[in-house]
Image (cartoon, rainbow, N blue to C red):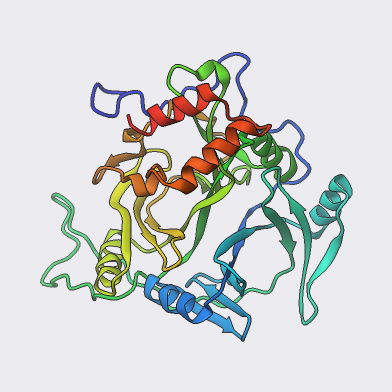
Amino acid sequence: MADHAHAELHSEQGALRHEHSGRSIDPVIKVTDLAWLEFEKPDLARAEAFATDFGFQVASRDADTLRLRGTFAGPPCLVIRRGPMSRFVGPSFFAAERGDLTRLASATGAAVRRLDRDEPGEVVALRDPSGFAVRVVHGVPELPALPEQRPLTLNTGATARRRNEPQRPPREPSRVQRLGHVVLETTVFRRALDWYLDTLGMITSDFLFLPGHRDRGPTMAFLRCDRGGVPADHHTVAMHLGPSVQYVHSAYQVTDLDAIAAGGEYLEERGYHRTWGIGRHIQGSQLFDYWHDPDRLMVEHFADGDLFDSSVEPGWAPMSASGLAQWGPPVTKEFLGTQPSPKLLREVFHALRDDNELDPGRLLGLMKAMNS
């Protein structure tokens, strides 16, 4: 890369000898995409109010379950069930064909079950090494597409596509198109990474490692679905080593930068809290804007992300706070989850006592990386 502020923050160079290849030689199946994410929340009315302000459409609602969708055709991309506390339950993925469910069930000792008594669709329910509930589904009914937020016609340099027509994007929610990815923190990073590669056939787009500790392996991975020659999102699941097992954020695609910005103004006017943004990431390249919902769970609007087919090998780069964005405001401690608190101290104390992959050396490396 050229000599500038982001030098060495991303490298297309693959693994060195004896490093992780970023993919499984013989995975059980290859999932094709995220289907939906499942959460529990005690107040479904409050969850619905934020969701519609954020840009989701309500697909269905009853006393105990809220299903939210984007404008693209497909099933609801968020399922929120009534529960005693606000928490992330786990992700569901699409299987390419019904036989994948049979193969997965046989390899894991699970069973293929009906997804719902009243609707078609089948599921294999699993647990990943971190303890998240992971489901793989097939035969799920699709909802038809909804009207889109029209992308603005842009004049760029000497190319004038818009003439005698002023730009007046409305102040309205950023209309969510689809679910993009989920990011997770885990104390058993290497075990979780290998499980997603070996069991679900995902492949790595980028690895991050602690500066000065590359010999100990990566501490963050951005995983995409392996669709062969058909491009997939740069990451569908991202995970990193940390002192707790927890949901970090989930991301939802919108039309373009204007949709992100105007939708952000709409959220701000309604009193919601921006966590970090607007900017453009390095790994994945997407435009981003992060918000907290009323229960302090983080969600992201994104647009213009990278799409890779299976020919792209993993990049390797050092982990750092400054390496999270090409441009944008400085990353916040709130986004990084590094604000000192009794909860964080308890998590660090228990993580260092428990049998996992976090030790004092790695903890110190993580702290340095998140302040660099």
Residue 1 lies, with reference to residue 231, above or below; the image says above
- Residue 71 at x, y = what percent? 47, 73
Q: Residue, x 36% and y 49% (percent of image)?
A: 334
Outermost residue on the top side: it is 17
Residue 105 falls left or right of residue 96: right
Residue 30 falls left or right of residue 56: right
Between 129 and 154, which is closer to the camera in this rendering?
129
- Residue 129 at x, y = what percent? 71, 42
- Residue 313 at x, y = what percent? 54, 30
Note whether residue 16 is visible: yes
Residue 212: quarter of image: top left
- Residue 320 at x, y = what percent? 38, 31
Quadrant where the image shows the N terminus: top left
Between 94 and 209, which is closer to the camera in this rendering?
209
Between 367 and 335, which is closer to the camera in this rendering?
367
Residue 367: quarter of image: top left
Note whether residue 204 is visible: no
Q: Residue, x 56% and y 43% (percent of image)?
A: 244
Number of callouts in the render?
A: 0
Outermost residue on the bottom side: it is 62
Residue 279 falls left or right of residue 116: left
Residue 14 lies, with reference to residue 326, above or below; the image says above
Residue 116 lies, with reference to residue 20, above or below; the image says below
Residue 46 lies, with reference to residue 208, above or below; the image says below
Quadrant where the image shows the C terminus: top left
Q: Residue, x 43% and y 45% (percent of image)?
A: 306
